[in-house]
Amino acid sequence: MKILILGLGTNGGGLSAALYFAKRGKDCVRVSDSAPRSAFALVPDQLESLGVECHFSQADPRDDIKWADIVIKNPAVPQSLPQLSLARRIANDFSFLFSSPLIKDIKLIAVTGTKGKSTTVAAVQHGLNELGQEALICGNIGISAFSVLEELEKREREGRKPPLYIVMEMSSWQIHDTYVSLNGFMPRLRLAILTSVYADHLNSYDTMREYYEDKLRLFGTHCEAILVNENDRKFFLEHTFGLKKLVSAFPGYKNPFREKKMELQCAYSALRLLGLERRKVISALSSYKGMPHRIEQVALYKDLMFVNDSAATIAEAVTFTMKNLAPLSTHLICGGTDKNLSGSGMLDALQMATSVTLLDGSFTRNELMPMMKERKMKYSGPFDNMKDAFDAALEQAVKKRKAFKQVQCILLSPGAASFELFKNEFDRGNQFKFLVKRYIAFDSGRESFPLES
């Protein structure tokens, strides 16, 4: 069979797909990407050593699409791409996982939402594993469903037990592509979760209605239980039909994380819905340490706390993070690339911040700067690189620490996309973490410091 991976991508999804089919040894595998070969470092060499044919700088992939029996589409490739009409069959990693008989006895948990998806997936997996209920994770969290499928197939060959759960983060694009690929079929879900609903991705969707519709395709009578944010329950019920009896809301008044550790509210409610005992769930989640780039405490040094929240790519996410850090004196680094969204959701965060430092970008200039100038709010920047922004925020924090003798938090929480200055939000966060390590190393008098990001 001829398999085309359309969109290798930089976050591993396309690579996992290519490796999965190449290792099977019975398919002709080709990769097609519009980016140049140099954008992928040594990955093309690795794939070609396995017999994968690689085509880069492909502005028009029609010949590759016409060649293939199956096109495995990267979520970043728009469904509206005209050449896709030439494909015999379009699939993605989830459609292959959901079509496998190996998941028949595994309980599936699917998580979607505008923000909070990754933390919920990671925290639910952590809680399940802590309680002896093995769970694997995959999806938009950075782990391809092909990786999980490969693990299931390996366990079957070796006679080992499958996991009890698979916890999946699904973006709106992944839900859409899976729904289309499976002709509207969705597998039986033990639990489906909607963490939040905000305006997002208007740089990719023509209307917010299209974005919401893709999110809501995840939910239906194939779900044994549904969990939604209490603020979105009315919206959810107005836009779905016949699901009211399946729907629970979080956090709920008895949620022990309602007033603190807000990122664990949904995970707690999810684990309780799965029938796990309250005391054990609280204990399991209390040992959860968080995820990279999502309210990630990088270091606490000489009363300076450094927090990396680079995955906050919408305005409302910044306010959410600031409320989690209150009442700390917080020096906010924010701004970046416009997603055709309003910056008003960040206003509370800007007003709460002790100082604001701006990264340059279209969102910064079109939304943040006009909004702050209108309200006569002070800011530093905009800066066209992370080092200058970091140094400016650090200078403000050090001055404040000396004056008030209290912990100061330096927070990277952009509220915007990253692509004008960085490869992606992970590169943005890694640059911030590198600068934190460098500052601590030099300030403490060490001659060298760890170079890994």
Image: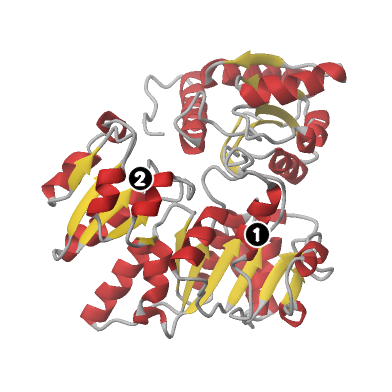
Give the image location of residue 64, x and y in percent: 25, 47
Give the image location of residue 379, x and y in percent: 74, 17
The N terminus lies in which quarter of the figure? bottom left
Q: Secondary structure at mark 2?
A: loop
What residue is shown with label 1?
213
- The residue positioned 37% from the left and 33% from the top of the image is 452
- The residue positioned 61% from the left and 45% from the top of the image is 205
As drawn, 378 above or below 426: above
Q: Amino acid at mark 1?
A: Glu
As drawn, 344 above or below 19: above
Q: How many neighbours does mark 2 have within 10 angstroms: few (below 14), some (14-19), or many (20 or more)?
A: many
Give the image location of residue 56, x and y in percent: 26, 36
As drawn, 324 above or below 236: above
As drawn, 355 above or below 22: above
In-front residue for pair 50/285: 50
- The residue positioned 41% from the left and 34% from the top of the image is 453
Residue 230, picture quadrant: bottom right
First in sequence: mark 2 vs mark 1: 2
Give the image location of residue 200, x and y in percent: 66, 44
Separation of residues labelled 2 and 1 (CA atoms): 24 Å
